[in-house]
Image (tube, rainbow, N blue to C red):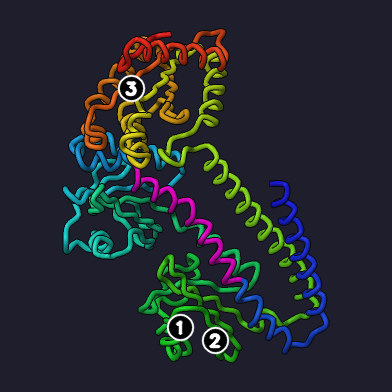
Amino acid sequence: MQFNYRIVFIITALLFTLSVSLTGMNYYVSMNLTHSQLKNSSIPLTVDNIYTEIQKLIIEPNLIASMMAHDTFMKDWLANQESDNEQVVKYLDTIQNKYQMFATFLVSEKTQNYYSAAGLLEKMEGGNQNNDWYFAFKNNPEVHEINIDKNEHMGSLLVMFINHKIFDNDFHMIGATGVGIRTSYINDMLKQFRLKYNFRVYFINDEGEVIISELDTSLISNIDELPELSEIKSDLISKGSQLFEYIRNDETVLLNRKYIPELDLYLLVEAKMNDFTNEVKETFYFNIVISLLLTVAITLIVLVYVRNIHIRLNQLADNDPLTGLPNRRFFNRSLEHALLLKKRNNTNLSVLFLDLDNFKKINDTKGHDVGDKVLKRIAKILTITIRATDFTSRWGGEEFIVLMLDSDIDGAISSAAKLCKAIEQDKSLVGLVDHKVTASLGVTEVKNDDDIDAILKRVDSALYKAKDSGKNQYIVG
């Protein structure tokens, strides 16, 4: 990380030096050069900054929506438990509150029910204008989309919805889920660009309708209302980026258009030349401020990007690539944290240590590819069987370990017995290796004076006793 931060500060210094140099040169240039700078630098940079801000806003919610669509709970609930509305409502409410989303939702393809954190809102019906988005999304080959719309159940403000399709194991669509984000942040951004930089910013659709603009300042609802824009409408409604120049009320106006594919809208940024050419000296000091702000903004963007990369690298380092479960390194940190909480709150902790019986024989006779599938299935069984509040990790090889929070030895024993039975009776495992797969477990309850080494040594000893005593059982240590 130190190397990355050094690069950030070098880039910041270069950007600042370049900005100040250009601003100093602009102080001595004529009106024609000011005009050229506005056309070739200021407006395009503003467009890119707005586009960057929109992308920044979309990244995290899009990841959250994708996570919801791939959540095994969501898929299992749609397939088998939709009669229990409380589960999914609680899930949606948890996601909405945890990530501070304006809204979360789920639509079941089977029942056409529309759920939110507030409960079951409505049934999706063809011909209902409010429901058209779902049927259009369903028929769209894309697996996710972003649109800006209103929902009668969420007030009258525009909401940016990020939709993801949910598929079953056969890649059949079984529903759609996602999040909603308020677009009020866009209004604040548009106001900032108007007041500070004299830019008027708005978004239009393919019909030329003004979809997003600063509240209480929009002069038009459609670009057809302005003859100057109506004449170039076919050019404005086009992909990519383009700069236009025309006369309105005896003033020269520059307009930059950029297509935003994430929103399927066109971003328009307007600037009146008179606002930038009245006082060259005043513009000089103004540009100094702009240079500083842009440098700080770009620095923050780069810093956030570097930090996100660091977080992602840590995630890769803390998870087992085969099963997707956390690895030993992450488990040890979690156990250390749980021990601190136990000392503070005097809560119960238990640990299960699981080892597959005769796994080497499976690898030798069936091949390592089948062995890998067995390990993935065991991870799935653990995820399904163990409580959601417990913490499951792959320890290494065919060994898995479970940290059971707020669980005494009786609860741990009950879970161990369920695991033994679930693994032995799993038909998928039998299908993979042509015989039953079993596991041996060591079980222990964490004592007040335990450290990590003592816990792992005790539960490991119990596991080996289970192995030596005939396997397919659990032993308490």
Q: Nearer the viewer, residue 240 or 357?
A: 357
Residue shown at the point (37%, 39%) measured from the top left: 368
State the count of labels.
3
Q: Position of residue 59 (x, y in %)?
A: 49, 55
Residue 84, located in which quarter of the rendered image? Answer: top left
Which mark is drawn over residue 343?
none
Residue shown at the point (66%, 80%) measured from the top left: 38
- Label 3 SS: strand
| Residue type indicated by callout 3 | Ala
Please give the range of residues in magenta: 46-71
- Label 1 SS: helix
Label 2 belongs to which residue? 244
- Find the distance from the CA under tag 2 to the CA under tag 1: 9 Å
Which mark is drawn over residue 236?
1
Label 3 belongs to which residue? 439
Whether pointer 1 and pointer 3 mark residues with C-beta atoms closer than 8 Å, the reply is no
Q: Position of 3 compared to 262: left or right?
A: right
Q: Position of residue 113 (x, y in %)?
A: 20, 48
Q: Position of 5 compared to 333: left or right?
A: right
Q: Position of residue 371 (x, y in %)?
A: 35, 36
Point out the tag, 1 or 3, that comes first from the N-terminus.
Answer: 1
- Find the distance from the CA under tag 1 to the CA under tag 3: 66 Å
Residue shown at the point (73%, 67%) measured from the top left: 291
